[in-house]
Image (spheres, rainbow, N blue to C red):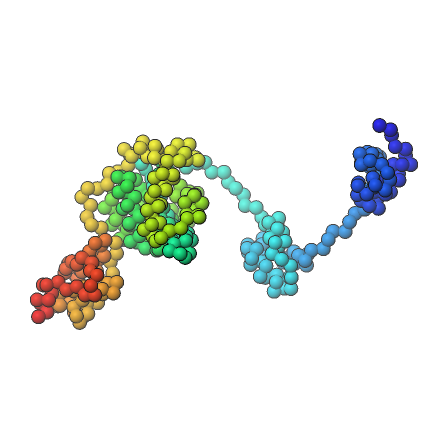
Amino acid sequence: MSRLSEKEQERIRKVFGRTASIRQTAKQTGHGRKAVRRALGCNNVINAPQTTPRKSKLDPYKAKIGYLVKEKHLSGVRVLEEITLLGYTGGYSILKEYIRIIRPKGLKVPRPPIDHAPGDEGQMDWSPHSVYMGGQRVVVHTGSFVLCFSRWIFTRHFFDETIESVIRLHEEAFDEIGAVPHKITYDNMTTVGRHTGTGTVWINPVFKRFAQEYGFEVVILLPGRKERHGKVERPFRYIEDNFLRGREFIDLEDLNNKADAWRANTANIRIHGTTRERPVDRLAREKSLLKPVPWNKTDQFFKEVRRLVNVDFCVTIDKKRYSANPKLIGRYVQVRLFRDHIEIWCDETMDCRHVYTQEDRQVLPEHEALYS
């Protein structure tokens, strides 16, 4: 390997100063690229000309963007709206990249894993999902119940998040397990309970009666404690990606039937990523430490509504009319809705009981006799 003369090295540096390209310099000087690189690595190398940075459409707005991001904590979409009003004509992509650079990075505080004793705690939560059902896209509400120790999961899909749906989810989960955890945790939700002030928690009276009957403690978590509820929140992504995505369903019943099969044949028998065991195996060890389902539980009612007894001595429930004592015409009564029947109460005394009907009007014989 012959050493280039000082004159040849000087020529290479001058050509590179004009072209700023190893390839073009080698081509114009007749030397190989390695020789060019060696020459440029010698002492007194003439640097390539400094190119002027290309102007960005963001430049006139960077001070404003910094204020909106760092002080106002606006999202990229909102920042775009604000600077567009000021004349910005660029795209969203370059704005998003710039915001990613300047936005203050949150300090991640390491948290130790939360251990749960067998049988101690379950967690329940909701998540909406878009599914293909009956030939069209619809939104269903996935109710999920997870036992924290075993990671055993139970799901039900509904079109709502009412107290009736919440109670049905719990009852069917308890029936499948054959047991009840000592406590169940929830985020703030009106159907179960919520924090109403410092140290003050309101529990929905209907759900409170339900919990007392099954013997579990209701725990409403403080807002902002997502990591405390991770056992039930993290699996929603798993449900979305591994069960719902790419499937079609006939109706809600078909969805729940397929969900049951998926849980039994996939979700609860897989090797869990954290425990490195199957949830169904850990459930077997946990089960003896859960509370038994009460054998003497009453028929818990889902909801109580107030209704006027009309001139035909009937109250209206879901467009059906149910009779009450004709003496109650014109008075408001409490109607307790159960899974398979309703009860009409007045002055803390039950007036009558009806099973649900498909007819427009249902009149009990004793009411008909009193009205005649």
Residue 229, picture quadrant: top left
Is the C terminus in the top left, top right, bottom left or bottom right quadrant? Answer: bottom left
Q: Position of residue 23 (x, y in %)?
A: 79, 41
359 vs 299, nearest the viewer: 359
Using the rendered image of the protein, determine whether residue 225 is visible from the camera's viewpoint.
Answer: no
Quadrant in which the N terminus appears: top right
Identify the residue shown where x is 72% and y is 55%.
Answer: 55
Q: Residue at x 36, y 38 (%)?
A: 265
- Rendered location of residue 364, percent (x, y): 12, 62
What residue appears at the point 39 percent right and 32 percent down from the top-left corner? 277
**Percent from the top left, x then y, of residue 85?**
61, 65
Residue 83 lies in quadrant = bottom right
**The furthest residue to the top:** 1
Which residue is nearer to you in this view: 199 or 278? Answer: 278
As drawn, the residue found furthest toward the bottom would be 311
Image position, residue 230 (x, y; %)? 42, 42
Q: Residue at x 34, y 33 (%)?
A: 282
Vertical arrangement, residue 63 with respect to residue 46, above or below: below
Q: Is residue 159 visible?
A: yes
346 to 4, vertically: above or below: below
Left or right of 274: which side holds 337?
Answer: left
| Total marks placed | 0
Q: Is residue 89 left or right of residue 282?
A: right
Image check: 240 left or right of 298? right
